Image: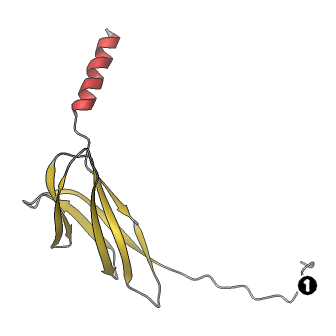
């Protein structure tokens, strides 16, 4: 009985569609006081889900659409030029949100250097 239950469970697990997943590479962008704008090339990888047309949106702007196959990884390439966090949405052509992610901007804080103490190399 237990073997039959485990075989049925495995068949149901294989039949259930995998959830759509996003992977943003890189997930963060470092900005400084001298360069407050993030300027990088980012990749958004889409895996799982179902066979459908997916569109990448930034704020209210549609960037591009691609056919996504659940057996393959769909990749979107982004040229990022922004001074704030960048939310990205994956939507259907009808406007239904499928998934979302955010490119985080991080402000670099330089550490203060210690002054030389004037000691010889063998003294503490």
Residue furthest to the top in view is: 1
Location of the N terminus by quadrant is: top left
Figure quadrant of residue 71: top left
Q: How far from the left and from the top, in percent, is residue 44?
A: 31, 62
User: In the image, is residue 38 above or below residue 68?
Assistant: below
Identify the residue shown where x is 39% and y is 65%.
27
Q: Quadrant of residue 97?
A: bottom left
Image location (x, y in percent) of residue 24 = 35, 62
Q: Vertical placement of 105 versus 20: above or below? A: below
In-image side of 118 versus 11 (left or right): right
Image location (x, y in percent) of residue 117:
83, 88
Residue drawn 31% across and 58% down?
A: 45
| Label 1 secondary element | loop
- Disc 1 crowd rating (10 Å Cα; few below 14, some 14-19, many 20+) is few
Residue at 38% across, 85% down: 37
Look at mark 1 in the image and give the residue it sits on. 120
């Amino acid at each position: 009985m237990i073997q039959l239950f485990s075989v049925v469970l495995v068949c149901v697990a294989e039949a259930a569609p995998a959830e759509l997943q996003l992977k943003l590479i890189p997930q963060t962008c470092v900005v400084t006081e001298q360069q407050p704008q993030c300027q990088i090339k980012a990749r958004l990888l889409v895996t799982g889900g179902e066979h459908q047309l997916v569109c990448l949106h930034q704020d209210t702007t549609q960037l591009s659409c691609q056919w996504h196959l659940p057996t393959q990884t769909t990749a979107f390439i982004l040229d990022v030029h922004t001074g704030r966090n960048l939310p990205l949405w994956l939507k259907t052509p009808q406007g239904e949100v499928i998934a979302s992610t955010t490119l985080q901007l991080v402000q670099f804080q330089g550490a203060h250097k210690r002054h030389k103490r004037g000691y010889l190399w063998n003294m503490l």
